[in-house]
Image (spheres, helix red, strand yellow):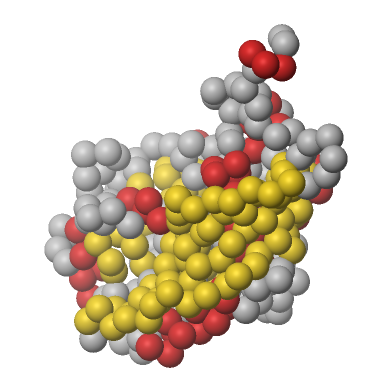
Amino acid sequence: MADYLNLKGFDNVFSSTLNNELQDNVVEFLDWALLEKGNYQNVTRGELSPDNRDYSKLRPIFNEVYPSGKAWEAFRQNWIWQSGVGYSPAPIVGTNKAIPGISGVYVNNAYYPSSTTGIYAHKVDYFHGRVLFNNPIPTGSTVQVEYSYKYINIIYANSLPWLREIQYRTQEVPASFLTSNKGEFALPAEMRVQLPAIAVEVVPRRKFRGYQLGGGQFVETDILFHCLAEDEFTRNKLVDIISLQNDKTIYMFNSNTLANNNAFPLDYMGSPVSGALRYPDLVSLYYRNAVDFKNASVQGMDMINTNFYAGIVRLTVESIEPSI
């Protein structure tokens, strides 16, 4: 097609374009890089809270989405499935690369590995911190899991609309956790946001400048990082973590190539596929380009209420786009 008839900068209207590429990559980078800085808590079987409640115990979910006894959730969401984290002690994940993540579950003190078949066959929804049995089991069962959950949650800003509820004090197991249809756990996991969290938002500010003779441009896009915590100390830490990445360079993977090769790490249920690729694998196998963080600025530090503190960091992300 003659160039004067062609739109530039993307292949087709179904392709992932720069805004979404930036947001996806920043979320995945922070999610992985924070793991390398120890952003998780390990939960061992039978580990008790100061109130003598079992951190490892799951509760059955009672809602219209799942048959009774099919889905069981923990008190914390966002479990770790990635292996190879360099921080010590390492997250609790199994060694079976065909089924990445936790190694199995305990039901009434009997252990069932992830490869189990039959009545206790199961998958894991890592986003929402729950085990999904292929067949419902009795709701009076005792289900326990050894797992690691992410302490700081890296989420998309569109995960914070008005219909979601901020969930406080999620480092401990509340009394309401094992009581069905009462308290904040009566809401589905999809409607709860657990703190601390950093919500990533691409905002409507973009600048261009020439890259080289013959084509290509530097593209500068602003991203906001909403730093949310239950106390001032943690909020300040989140603001520092993000703003100190000024002049940082990261690598991006190409979501379009990833999609064309059907290589997304997680399936529609939030469960890792066989041989799931971590962020370092994605940028190695499906490299797109490098981008630079610059012009970091803190836009606000507020106390919303006595249990909710927020801060905003703005970063400019500079990318070289040779096709425009």
Question: In x, y percent, where is residue 137?
Answer: 34, 45
* Image vertical order of residue 313 relative to residue 255, above or below: below
Tell me if I can see residue 94 in this picture. no
Residue under the point 62% across and 22% down = 7
Task: Identify which residue, 30 or 263, lies in the foreground.
Answer: 30
Question: In x, y percent, where is residue 110?
Answer: 49, 58
Residue 182: which quarter of the image? bottom left
Residue 316: which quarter of the image? bottom right
Residue under the point 64% across and 38% down = 255
Task: Identify which residue, 209 or 139, lies in the foreground.
Answer: 209
Furthest residue toward right: 213
Residue under the point 58% across and 36% down = 17
Screen quadrant of the N terminus: top right
Furthest residue toward top: 1
Question: In x, y percent, where is residue 252?
Answer: 71, 50
* Image vertical order of residue 293 relative to residue 137, above or below: below
Q: Is residue 57 left or right of residue 185?
A: right
Residue under the point 54% across and 50% down = 206
* Image vertical order of residue 231 relative to residue 20, above or below: below
